[in-house]
Image (cartoon, grey):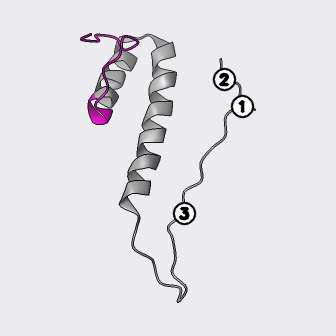
């Protein structure tokens, strides 16, 4: 089980160019950060074991195109 001390949050910040204007967002980085957040949420939801948590895991699996044996209702 992960404890609070083991968990390291990722901090998000919008890149700024040298002239102080907002730089173009790096879409690959944005998607990677989103996926990391979804995976972390999924791991917590798998431990809860309620019908609502299982439904959220199923939605996350669809977003991430996952299907593993750990998910409730896995098709494998």
Where residue 8 appears, as percent x and y from the top left, is: 67, 40
Residue 26's place in the image compared with 62, above or below, is below
Q: According to the image, label 3 marks what residue?
A: 13
**Figure quadrant of residue 66:** top left
Residue named by callout 2: 2
**Magenta: main secondary structure:** loop
Query: Which region of the structure is painted magenta?
Result: 62-76
The image shows residue 62 at horizontal and vertical percentages of: 26, 30
Q: Quadrant of the N terminus?
A: top right
Q: Quadrant of the C terminus?
A: top left
Q: Using a 10 Å C-alpha cutoff, classify the residue at mark 3 as few (fewer than 14 neighbours), some (14 to 19) or many (20 or more).
A: few
Which SS class for mark 1?
loop
Q: Which mark is residue 6?
A: 1
Do residues under tags 1 and 2 come within 8 Å of each other at their CB atoms? yes
Residue at point 45%, 78% (across, down):
22
Residue appearing at x 24%, y 11% in the figure: 75
Q: Tell me if mark 1 has few (under 14), some (14-19) or many (20+) residues whose alpha carbon lies within 10 angstroms of its own.
A: few
Image position, residue 43 (x, y; %)? 49, 23
Asked whether residue 21 is drawn in magenta, I would say no
């Amino acid at each position: 089980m992960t404890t609070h001390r083991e968990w390291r949050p990722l901090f998000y910040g919008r890149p700024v160019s040298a002239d102080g204007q907002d730089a173009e967002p790096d879409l690959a980085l944005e998607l990677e950060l989103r996926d990391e957040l979804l995976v972390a949420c999924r791991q917590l939801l798998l431990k809860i074991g309620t019908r609502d948590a299982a439904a959220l895991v199923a939605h996350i699996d669809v977003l991430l195109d996952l299907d593993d044996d750990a998910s409730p209702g896995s098709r494998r």
